[in-house]
Image: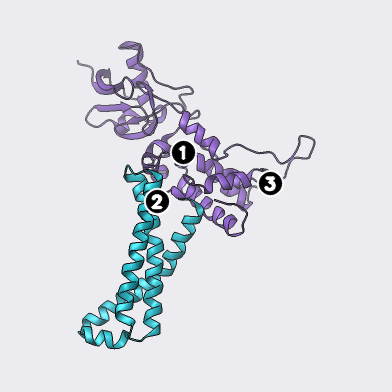
Chain colours: A cyan, B purple
Amino acid sequence: MNVRLYLWQRLTAALMLPLVLVHLALIFYAMRKGLTAADILSRTRGSVAWAVFYGVFVVAAAVHAPIGLRTVLAEWSPLGPRTRDLAAIAFGLLLLVLGLRAVAAVVLP
Amino acid sequence: MTTATLDVSVWRGGAQGRYETYQVPLRENQTVLDVVTWVQRNLDATLSYRFACRVGMCGSCAMTVNGRPRWTCRTHVAKVAKHGRLTIAPLENLPVIKDLAADMTPFFEKWQAAKGVFAPSKTREQPVEQITPDNAARRAADAGIECINCGVCYAACDTVRWNSDYLGPAALNRAWTLVNDVRDAGNAARLTAVAAAGGCHACHSHQSCQEHCPLALNPTASIAGLKRRTLQAYLRGEIKP
């Protein structure tokens, strides 16, 4: 890892820290209140705030995770530098697509 | 009366070697280096190992003792021998030359790669820089300056084991002492070197270096300092990764 990747990984970690806490609190709230899928969708559909909240979360995760995965692959796998980087980028794109798709499913009206 | 003995397994050969076990008289006051020397002088003169000062100053005699890297001249047998047994091997994470002698070449090459060499900013005609001992930069340099280059931290480091490009704790600790030396003029090249792949950002902060350093230095803290300093330099556009 060089200083540029380090900066991106730390920036996205700092960004995700409050987001993770809110996300966890949200899960506890929904469980304790016994909210149904319909209850949740009625609150998220058409909500710009939830779209921004989870959109930012997904983008940050899609940047943060591949940087760490790249290091794991470099240290623990026999992959060469190019294959390792391509695998990490592919994983990041997968997270981005799956994440944004999930966000779209709950916020689009 | 029988003399108490130690069972000492010593690594023999190169990378594909094996352990050989020797019986060594147990003394009341005895270091691991004494044991190795006794084997070489009394049982097998072909045993290769490295030492010089025998008093913990030169950093030559580090070996793996019962699985841990240690400076053998200052490691008492009574402290480390479990049930009268010692297993002694060359330092890990370095090529083995023969028996207990590890090849320190990669260790010192990385010292150079991290720009761990003082770059003078003045000529001998100019007056000597006045540096007060309580100056913050001087205190940061002092915290890491006593390194004896024994290689114990390098042998203990998981990141060195997993990433052959990683410069390692000793070289980065040395770079940090120079970053804090106001007389030094080499920081642009040094920060660039330690901010590249394999530099300070590869450190996982496992702190094995700090745990094993015989001089109780804290290379992890030095590396954390380098991470901060390189990040500042990068954000200011002073270095390019």
Quadrant (top left, top right, bottom left, bottom right) of the N terminus of chain B: top left
Task: Give x and y (percent) for residue B117.
Answer: 60, 36
**Residue on which the image places disc 1:** B215
* Chain assignment, label 3: B
Point 37% across, 39% down: residue = B161
Which is nearer the eye, A87 or B178? Answer: A87
What's the CA distance linking mark 1 and mark 2?
39 Å
- The type of residue carrying mark 3 is Ile
Q: CA distance from mark 1 to mark 3?
A: 24 Å
Q: Quadrant of residue A68?
A: bottom left
Give the amino acid type for the residue marked by disc 1 in the picture. Leu
The residue indicated by pointer 2 is A85
Query: Is the residue B142 above or below the residue B82 in the image?
Result: below
Which type of secondary structure does the marked residue at label 1 adopt?
loop
Q: For the residues carrying marks 3 and 2, which lies nearer the camera in this image?
A: 2
- Name the spot of residue A65 as percent of width and height, x first: 37, 60
Q: Chain of mark 2?
A: A
Q: In the rendered view, would you say A109 is above or below B88? A: below
Instruction: State the residue at coordinates (24%, 87%).
Output: A39
- Work out whether B47 lies above or below A85: above
Q: How many marks?
A: 3
Q: On the image, numbered disc 3 is attached to which residue?
A: B131
